[in-house]
Image (cartoon, rainbow, N blue to C red):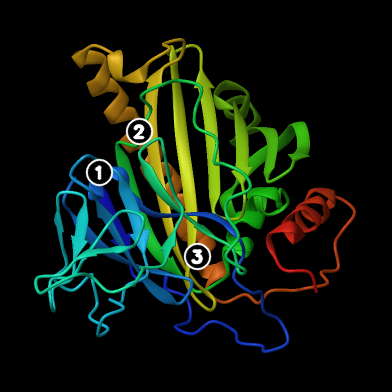
Amino acid sequence: MTTRDAPSGAGGPQHAVEDPGRHLPYPSGWFCLARSRELAPGNVLTRRFMGEDVVLYRTRDGRARAVHPYCPHLGAHLGAGGTVEGQYLVCPFHRFAFAPDGTCASTPHGPPPRARLQHHAVSERNGFLFAWNEPDGAPPTWEVPGTLQAGVVPTAAWSTDVRTHPQEIIENTLDYRHLPVLHHVAVRELEPPTVQGALLRMRLRLGPDRPAALRRRIQADHSFLMAGLGHLRVELPLPRLGLVSYLWAMHTPTGPRHTRMLVATACADLHAPDAAAAPLPRRGLHRAFAHAMLRTAVGKVRQDLRIWNTKRYEPQPRLAANDEAIGLFRHWARQFYPPP
């Protein structure tokens, strides 16, 4: 299941607050451009990324590539009619063919020119296709970690456009104080945020804000993993059901103060080493649970959209006494931008 929301969010104002003195540049790191299932061998897709188009394609032997969109011959857009022939991406204008390393490999009329397509490094994890961004073009320095269980891929997904920067969205996870106010969710910190390079982890116990008897019955321990400013994964073990659920929130900058948000969910047996090996009846249960989790998550995100689409970034926030996690997050996030 894939659904999309309109950029305006949940009934809020149609234009976000603009303030030239409060903005963030595009961050470095890995950002999701598509689910793996969207890019079958031989397919070509165009995605918006950091204010520009990126053309995704998959060679016939299964390798995914992400290249800049314009043919260096005469500038045709490779996503507007380009095709994959074997291992080559072929331009729709003059049929110049480009190899996976970007070099022009052949033309219909003689030897190829010395030309090369610029490309982004690509990584695939848990059914998502990520592209690397670094302002100075440097290669990746870290990887998005996959799940410990093999075969875990999302079975339900939803996406929307948000008028804000990805840092503003992922910072929301560290803002514990808004959970009871906006979402009516009680929160208890089980493990404080810890930083390991580009990764940030924490564990929270979440449940209904009231009544107390209901909160005790259905509160659950959530493990959060942030990998850069574009990737959030939440794991929720459910021992009584013998299940573990996974939720991903991907935040990809498409333009200045514009972010494409993808929320996806999956479910697996708690102690199974390979989620794909589950028998068919259990897979049906997994899909049903993943769809239920997605509906719950999307309901919370829609409450956030009214805030994100109208708030402004505060570079020097006046933090309260219990906002230590936000301060830690801001310090951690600095590594994804060029030095001032």
Tell me the kind of residue under disc 3.
Leu
Circle 3 residues within 10 Å: few <14, some 14–19, many ≥20 = many
Please name whichever residue, 81 or 295, is drawn nearer the observer in this view of the structure: 81
Tell me the kind of residue under disc 2.
Val
Please name whichever residue, 288 or 19, is drawn nearer the observer in this view of the structure: 19
* Quadrant of the frame with the C terminus: bottom right
Q: Earlier in the sequence, mark 3 or mark 1?
A: 1
Residues at marks 2 and 3 touching, judged by CB atoms closer than 8 Å: no
Circle 1 residues within 10 Å: few <14, some 14–19, many ≥20 = few
Q: Which residue is mark 3?
A: 305
- Secondary element at tag 1: helix
In this view, 149 is above or below 249? above
Q: Is residue 190 left or right of residue 217?
A: right
| Picture residue at 78% right of the left edge, 73% below the top | 315
- Residue 84: x and y, percent? 16, 56
Q: Which residue is mark 2?
A: 153
Q: Which residue is mark 1?
A: 37
